[in-house]
Image (tube, rainbow, N blue to C red):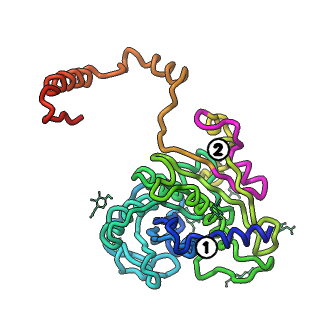
């Protein structure tokens, strides 16, 4: 076990000074001062990659894909862990490391601010090969968490902007600052935050290693959701080196049940497993669901997703579309006329190739 971990750490440094190093944008929802993103940043840099963080000024957990930009030019309160004081600009650099930026917005907003402002203005418009989110404090498992988790939101925001993305989340859910990383632990192994970051770095380096130089790390629209279990190194070595397993997002995943308390008049949520939240429509239905893999053992799950939400072709889609007719036509007549007109124009103009019809 320990040997494997060690070899992963060694492998993690093998891109230094090679052409395989890539350009990475990092984000999260726990905030720019979190232990896990800082350890991940440190190890990706140690691997030789060019790395930049643009992450929320504060905890933005549970924001999903919301894109919220602040209306205040300055921070109304101190950033998380008091790293930056109230009154500082709403977008700025970490006081110690200039390649770590905070922005007072949601994870998705941070992705856009990075791509549209920080990188063009301060990094010579450097092109980004990969976005990585997290590792989040706490797992993000299943279809329900996909839209709820800020770690996912920052990631699919990047994918929507043509940047391949990987969301990392880990079972250690205690949110803490990068100034609290235990150098030594009861198990003699690194802090859980460090091990979570090593696992994430190993996965990134595997992807990079499998990609030809100057080729996309994943095709347009694709991303990965990676979840790692609770790492026990603070107390023992029973789960310090989980193997990665190919999974799918659905399967054994939970959604919310609203539970009413008549005494307080309030609701809280409990976990509910339903068929609707776990049905396999897309993807490889033979793969295990990521939720039971990570929740029931010392395993890490790797699910491949796309941000194309359209239903696949087949009798189900056909049946639904048929039920909508004639109210919902396949093509609205105006659009159809426009297409005809375009074709007519193209036919005319085809004898005069210097003209182009823009579609
Ligand atoms: C990349 O792949 C080569 C060949 O399979 C292997 O020797 C090397 O250790 C890998 N490097 C990383 C960082 O995974
Ligand atoms: C971060 O925000 C989430 C969602 O609002 C909350 O559950 C969590 O306790 C917060 N964490 C901290 C450290 O404030
Ligand atoms: C904006 O931030 C300043 C401190 O920088 C604070 O005094 C002010 O109340 C904030 N405004 C709003 C609308 O939050
Ligand atoms: C930055 O690069 C993108 C594409 O790589 C390009 O569309 C954009 O115009 C560039 N912006 C600046 C400020 O150079
Ligand atoms: C880890 O470090 C923190 C802060 O330095 C300390 O309070 C805590 O007791 C340490 N925990 C372990 C298990 O070593
Ligand atoms: C190892 O530590 C974890 C908590 O980190 C605990 O739940 C588990 O029981 C411990 N296992 C052993 C074998 O002591
Ligand atoms: C409802 O809330 C009250 C007050 O917090 C608590 O004492 C009680 O246990 C709750 N009831 C249930 C069924 O959870």
Q: Residue at x 58, y 55 (%)?
A: 210
The magenta-colored residue range is 281-302
Is 339 left or right of 80, judged from the image as shown? left
The quadrant in which residue 284 appears is top right
The image position of residue 184, as x and y in percent, is: 73, 83
Most foreground residue, 121 or 217:
217
Q: Residue at x 36, y 80 (%)?
A: 88
How many numbered dots are placed on residues in this image? 2
Is 79 left or right of 12, judged from the image as shown? left
Is 223 left or right of 337, judged from the image as shown? right
* Residue 65 showing in the rendered view: no
Q: Residue at x 63, y 81 (%)?
A: 180
Is 333 part of what is drawn in magenta?
no
* Residue 1 showing in the rendered view: yes
Residue wearing tag 2: 248
Point out which mark residue 13 bears: 1
Quadrant holding ligand 4? bottom left
Figure check: 353 above or below 57: above
Is 189 left or right of 253, judged from the image as shown? right
Distance from Cα at disc 1 to Cα at disc 2: 30 Å
Q: Residue at x 45, y 52 (%)?
A: 159
């Amino acid at each position: 076990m320990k040997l494997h971990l060690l070899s992963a750490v060694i492998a993690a440094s093998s891109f230094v000074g090679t052409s395989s190093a890539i350009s990475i944008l990092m984000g999260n929802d726990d905030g720019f001062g979190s232990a896990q993103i800082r350890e991940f940043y440190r190890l990706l840099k140690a691997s030789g990659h060019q790395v930049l963080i643009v992450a929320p000024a504060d905890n933005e957990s549970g924001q999903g894909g919301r894109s919220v930009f602040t209306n205040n030019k300055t921070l109304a309160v101190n950033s998380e862990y008091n790293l930056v004081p109230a009154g500082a600009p709403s977008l700025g650099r970490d006081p110690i490391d200039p390649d770590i930026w905070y922005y007072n917005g949601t994870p998705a907003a941070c992705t856009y601010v990075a791509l549209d402002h920080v990188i063009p203005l301060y990094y010579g418009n450097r092109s980004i090969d990969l976005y990585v989110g997290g590792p989040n404090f706490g797992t993000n498992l299943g279809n329900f968490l996909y839209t709820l988790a800020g770690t996912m939101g920052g990631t699919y925001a990047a994918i929507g902007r043509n940047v391949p993305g990987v969301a990392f989340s880990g079972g250690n859910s205690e949110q803490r600052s990068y100034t609290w990383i235990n150098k030594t632990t009861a198990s003699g192994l690194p802090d859980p935050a460090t091990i979570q970051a090593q696992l994430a770095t190993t996965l990134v380096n595997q992807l990079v290693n499998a990609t030809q130089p100057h080729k996309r790390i994943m095709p347009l629209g694709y991303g990965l959701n990676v979840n790692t279990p609770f790492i026990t190194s603070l107390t023992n070595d029973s789960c310090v080196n989980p193997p990665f397993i190919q999974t799918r997002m659905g399967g054994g995943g939970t959604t919310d049940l609203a539970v009413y308390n008549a005494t307080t008049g309030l609701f809280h949520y409990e976990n509910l497993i339903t068929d609707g939240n776990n049905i396999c429509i897309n993807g490889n239905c033979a793969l295990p669901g990521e939720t039971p893999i990570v929740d029931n053992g010392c395993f890490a799950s790797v699910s491949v997703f796309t941000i194309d939400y359209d239903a696949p072709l087949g009798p189900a889609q056909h049946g639904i579309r048929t039920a909508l007719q004639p109210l919902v036509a396949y093509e609205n007549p105006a659009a159809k006329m426009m297409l005809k007109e375009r074709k007519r124009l193209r036919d005319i103009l085809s004898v005069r190739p210097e003209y182009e019809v823009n579609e």
